[in-house]
Image (cartoon, rainbow, N blue to C red):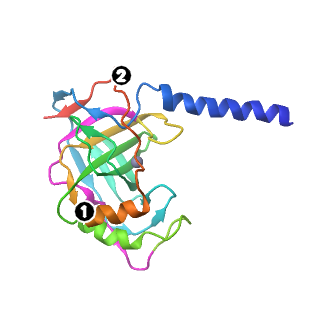
Amino acid sequence: MKLFIVPLLLYALAATANTCDSGQRQSPIDITATARQKLPALTFDYRAAPLKIADDGHTVRVRFGNGSQLHIGNQRYTLQQFHFHTPGGDRIAGEEFPMAAHLLHKSQSGQLLALVVLLRVGAENPLLNSLLPLIPVKADGDHMPAGVMVDANGLLPASRGYYRYAGSLTASPCTEGVDWIVLKQPLELSAAQLAQYRKRFADNARAVQPVHQRIVLESL
Ligand SMILES: [Zn+2]
């Protein structure tokens, strides 16, 4: 039995390392050259929901039910969860941001879409203000503090211009075929908020990956 299982496990590990190391459509990237064109508008229908917050061992994660949606053209995506990275992962023309929010969505057919909101140091961020004190003290699953609601609209900048590229999950197994949308306008968080987050989760972003043959679309 052992002889049979061990090679299978080794094979699985090798396959995983493969996509992360040699995939051609990996995230995040440094967005430099883009193809500017008319792209479908992002229409957000996010609704306040009871807060479901966890330390997942790598970041703070907030999970959603089926109430918040994003429409792009005639595609409909449901918000599954959002979480944060520091530094921000995706760069714009070489600029590295101190933080990013990743809002993960899924379509009815199972297509994954990551919406990236970059954050710069500046004014205090109201949503982080309410979330940071509620991060569970250890990685022990979802917590639902009584009576606390969360609204992902608080993570959206006023301007909805965006970049779009073919990307991947940023952690092993680095699965490709994930739609990446990076909003052009960053939000702000205060230096104190960044320090508070970094005290719990420092440097939990993947390094930028080669663009290879991909074309990054940019909305007009
Ligand atoms: Zn992420």
Quarter where residue 82 is shown: bottom left
Q: Position of residue 131 (x, y in %)?
A: 35, 69
Establish if 48 lies above or below 91.
below
User: Which quadrant of the structure image shows residue 193?
Assistant: bottom left
Mark 1: amino acid: Ala
Q: Secondary structure at mark 2?
A: loop
* Identity of the residue furthest to the right in this view: 1
Residue drawn at (38%, 36%), measured in percent from left and top? 27
- Name the amino acid type tagged 2: His
Q: Which residue is mark 2?
A: 212
Q: Secondary structure at mark 1?
A: helix
* Location of mark 1 (residue): 191
The residue positioned 35% from the left and 52% from the top of the image is 86
Q: Nearer the viewer, residue 79 or 116?
A: 116
Q: Comparing marks 2 and 1, which lies closer to the viewer?
A: 1
Highlighted magenta segment, given as a residue range: 145-167
Say if mark 2 contacts mark 1, CB within 8 Å: no
Residue extending furthest toward the top: 213
* Residue 157, percent from left and from top: 19, 54
